Image (cartoon, rainbow, N blue to C red):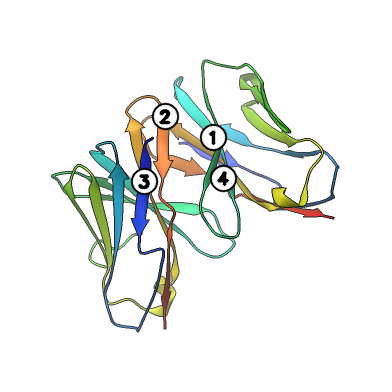
């Protein structure tokens, strides 16, 4: 069975703080893909990153960084120097053994000015 | 670039009416598309897999007769909510894989349905 767990339901930070969103996944497949999406109040899913199971390199994109660790089945997302515009719901997702996307429950991030 | 477009973005209807939501792949063909439903403050839950030229595959607990899916062409899948009721009010999102086996997936903008 495939599963994605985002244990943090809501996180509230003050602007300029760093924040890490946790994601733990489960799959028996050796080939899989992990994603992070941002969902602002408008509802549209904004793609942030895709990582395949054979690429454990961490990635940095501006203020965003991702830490993929197969040993702990985790794919955590860090926002450095958070801004009010980062306030949104963030979803971690998994595709394995097909093309269905399994989403985590989401983490609602509030960044206060 | 590859894009998935949904229409309408939002719709309000009376209880008992049927509503059709379209999902189109632009600039690429999609033999498979996926329909998700998202209730307020909840995650996206897969409803069904739409297959071009064949019947859709529904997830457990999703009523086939309630949510009719038609994948009539390689670029269009439609979801019809039949005899809609207030509990069907939700955000519906479709997605389509751009290239199989690469995990490259595109989501539509979503359609917000409100049933009065």
In the image as oriented, which residue stretches furthest toward the left? B53
Please name the residue that numbered disc 4 is placed on.
Answer: A104
Q: CA distance from mark 2 to mark 1?
A: 9 Å
Q: Can you give x and y, in whole percent of width and height, for residue A24 in the image?
A: 63, 35
Is residue B12 rendered to the left or right of residue B82? right
Give the mark, 1 or 4, whose residue is nearer the N terminus.
1
Q: Nearer the viewer, mark 4 or mark 2?
A: 2
- Element on which disc 2 rests: loop
- Element on which disc 1 rests: strand
- Compared to residue B107, the image places residue A10 above or below, namely below
Q: Nearer the viewer, mark 1 or mark 3?
A: 3
Please name the residue that numbered disc 3 is placed on.
Answer: B4
Please name the residue that numbered disc 1 is placed on.
Answer: A35
Please name the residue that numbered disc 2 is placed on.
Answer: B103
Residue at (35%, 36%) from the top-left corner?
B97
Is residue B7 rendered to the left or right of residue A14? left
- Of all chains, the one bearing label 2 is B
- Which one is in front, A45 or B38? A45
- Element on which disc 3 rests: strand
- Of all chains, the one bearing label 1 is A
Q: Are marks 4 and 2 in contact (CB under 8 Å)?
A: no
Q: Quadrant of the N terminus of chain A?
A: top left
């Amino acid at each position: 069975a495939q599963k994605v767990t985002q244990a943090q339901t809501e996180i509230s930070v003050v602007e300029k703080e760093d924040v890490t969103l946790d994601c733990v996944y489960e799959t028996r497949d050796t080939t899989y893909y992990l994603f992070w999406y941002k969902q602002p109040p408008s509802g549209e899913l904004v793609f942030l990153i895709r990582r395949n199971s054979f690429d454990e390199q961490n990635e940095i994109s501006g203020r965003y960084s991702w830490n993929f660790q197969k040993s702990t089945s985790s794919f955590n997302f860090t926002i450095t120097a958070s801004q009010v515009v980062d306030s949104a719901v963030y979803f971690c997702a998994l595709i394995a053994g097909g093309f269905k996307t399994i989403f985590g429950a989401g983490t609602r991030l509030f960044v206060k000015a | 670039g590859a894009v998935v477009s949904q229409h309408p973005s939002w719709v309000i209807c009376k209880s008992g009416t049927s509503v059709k939501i379209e999902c189109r792949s632009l600039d690429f063909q999609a033999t498979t598309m996926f329909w998700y439903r998202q209730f307020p403050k909840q995650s996206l839950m897969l409803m069904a897999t739409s297959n071009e030229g064949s019947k859709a595959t529904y997830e457990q607990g999703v009523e086939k007769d309630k949510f009719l899916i038609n994948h009539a062409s390689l670029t269009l899948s439609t979801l019809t909510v039949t005899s809609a009721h207030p509990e069907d009010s939700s955000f519906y999102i479709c997605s389509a894989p751009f290239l199989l086996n690469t995990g490259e997936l595109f989501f539509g903008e979503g359609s917000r349905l409100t049933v009065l």
